[in-house]
Amino acid sequence: MVTFVKKIMGLPPKLYVLLVVCTLGGSVVGIDTALVSGAQLFFITRFNLDTSLQGLTIAATLLGALVGAILSTVLNQYVGRKGAMFFGGIDAIAAGLIEGFANIWGVLLLGRLILGICFGIMTSTIPMYLAECAPTDIRGVFTSVYQLAYAFGYFVGLVVDVIFVHVEHGWRFMLASVIVPAALVTIGLFFAAESPRWLLAKGRENAAWKSLTQLRSSEQAALQDFDTMRQFLEKERETMKVQPGFFRTMYEKPSARRPVMLGIALQIAQQFCGVNAVMFYFDYVLQLAGMTASRSIDVSVALGFATVLFTFPTFWLIDRFGRRFLLLTTMPFLSIMLWVCGFSFFGGTKIREALNISGTLLFRFFYGPGLGPVPWVIVAEIYPWYIRSQCLTMNSFISYMLNFVVSFSWPTMLKSMHAQGAFSFFAGFTLLSTLFIYLFIPETKGVEMEAIQELFQYPLYTIAKKNLNQTKARMSKLPIFRHCISSPPVKAESVDHSSQVDTPEPETTKTSFEASSSKA
């Protein structure tokens, strides 16, 4: 822990600026999640919306995010990471004004669609921006910032809900409050450094060197990283001369296709744990449990504070214990908490309220250091450089598409499947996702970004075999399992020495990744 604090405290000022700007950019998504959660209690009656239109209004930002994710590829290619985030900030300011002044439902829907474009841009850009600027030993901390940003924005949004809940037309102020973090992002970007990897890719070596010296604690560290980046990019440029297009690359290169498949699987696991149904509709579910609108918003502030609080352990844990470990140790508890929330509806009003609040708080407790930030950390690391931007765009597109499906269908699920069935659906899916991650996700902690793609030179079944062997090796060290698997001692006089064959130890005890892959 002391080493971790020293690393964070010894960062250059430009890295702190980068963290603040990206935190504000990511908070735009979180703040809207909270704002619309409170505002929907009022605008559904103002515009007389049924459950389908309610779900469409809430989830409209996710449709816009699909457009933003595609647009981010062009922006990141031609105007860089800073330029893409600047465009997203301006977009959010315009959307906030439209939402705040909407007098008909169609205008409100348009504002939410436009706001979603910002979501797609920020989600595609921020993890990549942070991963490309961060030193290797704390890269996991940096790429976890996006989840902290979301949590911070969610808490601030809930505080805004409390402030305006008793104000006439307060829902307008709630939705328009997204303008504040968006404006701060656009201003802060003028003081942030551009990604040195992007600058090098554009042939701007002087600008890349200047940016890197601002992002490293010493010139020696900057020079080492600069040489590594330049050598790798030169090698990649040679490859790109004969490199086919994205889809042909996916078809012809298994080493590129495998991380894309795993990235998509991680997004499916993240969205189908039901987190956005829980967060978007927390106030709504509390009302179903028997609470008044104002009281449910007050209770939501505790959830928002817990969301921020439970995210902080990630910064220490993710580069200490690894990405895969955090996922496997937290996801089973997510399933349990979802069942707690769902089956609480068998009880009376007090039981519903108590179990929904405690279940949701504990859900956030286990989601904060696990399935929340870790998938974004992994996908920012595993993709090859020459298709990284396209892959992250595809990841964001799929994430928001699944998010839309979950958010749009949640009110209908609650009505048709009841709370017990709706929550159980996500709980069961999370358990299946845990099994998939256990088998097929490799550990990327401490591996250089330029070397991570070498992990995927091996088939996925080889990765699964390695993970199983590692589990077996760890379990064999436990006293209870060592006793179970150890064979009874053989008496000396019963041993037939003539039948013994000397076998070289390295050949029979090899359990490394390379040995497993060569056998496969």
Image (tube, rainbow, N blue to C red):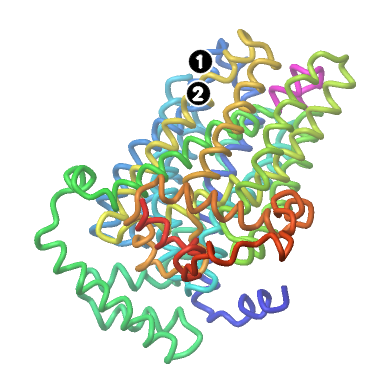
**Residue drawn where x is 36% and y is 69% of the image:** 195
Q: Amino acid at mark 2?
A: Thr
Q: Nearer the viewer, residue 8 or 367?
A: 367
Q: Quadrant of residue 426?
A: top right
| Vertical comparison of 405 with 28: above or below | above
Q: x, y (%) of residue 71?
A: 29, 44
Q: Amino acid at mark 1?
A: Leu
Residue 241 is left or right of residue 316, and the answer is left
Question: Magenta stretch containing residue 31, yes or no?
Answer: no
Tell me the quadrant of the picture where the N terminus can be found: bottom right
Judging by the rendered image, the residue that carries numbered circle 2 is 57
Callout 2 secondary element? helix
Q: Which residues are magenta?
A: 283-294
For the residues labelled 2 and 1, say whether their Cβ atoms are less than 8 Å apart.
yes
Q: Nearer the viewer, residue 121 or 342?
A: 342
Q: Quadrant of residue 68?
A: top left
Q: x, y (%) of residue 493?
A: 71, 64
